[in-house]
């Protein structure tokens, strides 16, 4: 049985709201981590910061970077040590740094 278009629109609206909430949670999480890493104190143009973060994301997608603190906990390293390594690498790798 096919759904009427009004039901489909209603479902789309609910999904859009769920997407918005999920994006907000992700942005808040990433923002907290960035502040802990000291990115809030760095004077850098948004374009340069975006380029550095895109490079960092590419490293994680390619499997070159560490993915979470859970693995570090299993090996006895702290998640904070990982954050320092990642933040240091990102801060040093951009061309347009201020």
Image: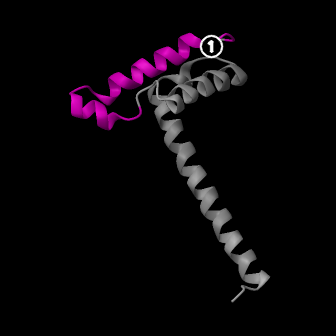
Residue drawn 66% across and 26% down?
Answer: 50
Q: Magenta span: helix, strand or loop, mainly?
A: helix
Residue 4: x, y in percent? 76, 86
Report the side of 44 relative to 72 (left or right): right
- Quarter holding residue 92: top right
> Could you tell me residue 82's position as x and y percent?
37, 24
For disc 1, the neighbor class at 10 Å (few under 14, some 14 to 19, many from 20) is some
32 or 70, which lies in front? 70
Q: Please tell me which residue is depicted at 33% across the width and 22% down the height of the picture.
A: 81
**Magenta highlight range:** 67-96
In the picture as drawn, the residue positioned furthest to the bottom comes out as 1
The C terminus, quarter of image: top right
Residue at screen point 44% across, 29% down:
36
Q: Quadrant of residue 52?
A: top right
Q: Position of residue 9 (x, y in %)?
A: 75, 75
Q: Is residue 93 magenta?
A: yes
Quarter of the N terminus within the rendering: bottom right
User: Residue 76, image x and y in percent?
Assistant: 21, 27
């Amino acid at each position: 049985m096919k759904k009427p278009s009004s039901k489909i629109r209603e479902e789309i609206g609910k999904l859009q709201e769920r997407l918005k909430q999920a994006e907000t949670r992700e942005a808040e999480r990433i923002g907290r981590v960035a502040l802990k890493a000291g990115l809030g104190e760095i004077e850098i143009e948004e374009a340069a910061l975006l380029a550095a973060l895109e490079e960092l994301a590419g490293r994680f997608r390619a499997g070159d970077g560490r993915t979470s603190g859970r693995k570090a906990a299993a090996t006895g390293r702290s998640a904070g040590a990982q954050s320092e390594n990642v933040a240091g690498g990102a801060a040093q790798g951009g061309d347009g740094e201020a």
